[in-house]
Amino acid sequence: NRVIALTDNGNLYHIRDLGQGSPSEEWARTGEEGVPDPKPGTQPILGFPDETGHPPIRVLGTKVLRSYGAAAGKLLGDYPLPEGYVATSNPVMDEEGNVLFVAGADPDGQYFGRHYLLVVQPDGTAAAESNAEIALPASKTKIVAMSIGIKDWLLMGTSNAGLVIFNRADGEVYKTVSGSAENFLEVAPPVQAANGMIFFGVFPSYIYALDETGEDCWSHDLDEGDSSIGAQLQPASPLILPSGKVLFHAGNYLVGIDCDGAIAPSNSPWPRFGGNDRNTGNIADSVSVE
C-alpha cells in the first residue's frame, strides 16, 4: 500500500494508499532535495531494511546515485559518478544489496566510445569490481538496459549493437547477439528463465528468444502492418509467468507466448525479474522458484 514515485523533473514522492480510494502523500523531496538530472523512466529501488526495519530508497540520476531513508525521506548520501561518466542503463540490485548500473564515457552525440559497469555497495562506496570496462564490438553505442541473469551473467541491451551478455565473474563479454539494423534499434531489459532461456523485446516491434548458451532460438515481428496500432515496445521488458507463458508489451496490447518445455522465472537476485510478479522492486519480496 505504499508507492515510491519519481517524476521526470526529479521530484520523489512517498505515497500511501490504505485502499479507501484516497491515497495520501507521506513525504516529498523536490528541488535540491530531489534527484538531480534524473533518467526518464527510472524506477527507484529498495535496499535491505536497516535497523529500523525500513529499506533505503536508491535512485539513479545521470551523474549520481542518491539514497534516501524510506521512513521520512531523509537524504542518506550520494555516490557521484567518476568525472566524465554518464549513467545510461537502469539500476539493478544483487543479492548482496549492491546497486549495479552502466555508465558511458567518451561521448559522441548520443552514443559513447567506452562503457563501464559500476557497482555501489550498501554503504555507498564502490565495490572492488566496480569500474570494469565492457568491451563492445561496436565503436560507438549506448547500453540502455540491464538485468541480472543466472551463471553470473548480466544481460545488457544497447541502442544499436544488440544484446550483450557480460560475465560478471571474469569481467568479460561472453557474447553479443545482433541482427539487422532495422530490428535491433533498442533492446529492452531482457529476462532469463530458470532453464536458461533469455527473452527480450527490441524497438519497435521484434521479440527474441535465446537458448541457455545465448544462441538464437526464434524471433517474431509483432507489427502486423496496421500503422494505427503498430507494435511499439518503447522498449518494454517481458514477464515470465510461473505458468510458463511469456508476456510482451506491444504498445496497445499484450502478447502472450506459450513456450515448449519447462519455462519458469529464474531465481536471479534482481527481484523485478526474479519471480516477483507484483513488481514491487523490493529484494525481500519475491517468490521462491523451485
Image: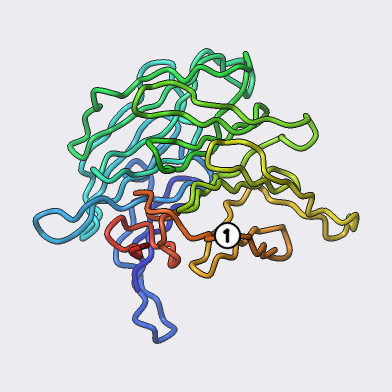
Q: Quadrant location of the C terminus?
A: bottom left
The residue to which callout 1 is attached is: 261
Report x, y in % for residue 239.
55, 59
Residue found farthest to the front: 261
Query: What secondary structure is found at the residue carrying circle 1?
Result: loop
Q: Identify the residue shown where x is 39% and y is 62%.
A: 280
Vertical position of residue 135 compared to residue 161: above or below: above
Q: Identify the residue shown where x is 30% and y is 53%.
A: 46
The image quadrant of residue 36 is top left
Name the residue type under label 1. Answer: Gly
Could you tell me how many numbered marks the image carries? Answer: 1
122 horizontally vs 221: left or right: left
The image quadrant of residue 185 is top right
Report x, y in % for residue 176.
59, 27
192 horizontally vs 125: left or right: right
Report x, y in % for residue 97.
25, 44
Observer-nearest of 205 and 142: 205
Residue found farthest to the left: 51
Q: Assess disc 1: are there few (<14), some (14-19) or many (≥20) residues with their C-alpha within 10 Å of its C-alpha.
A: few
Vertical position of residue 211 compared to residue 169: above or below: below
Vertical position of residue 36 compared to residue 34: above or below: above
Q: Identify the residue shown where x is 38% and y is 57%.
A: 281
Q: Quadrant location of the N terminus?
A: bottom left
Observer-nearest of 241 and 66: 241
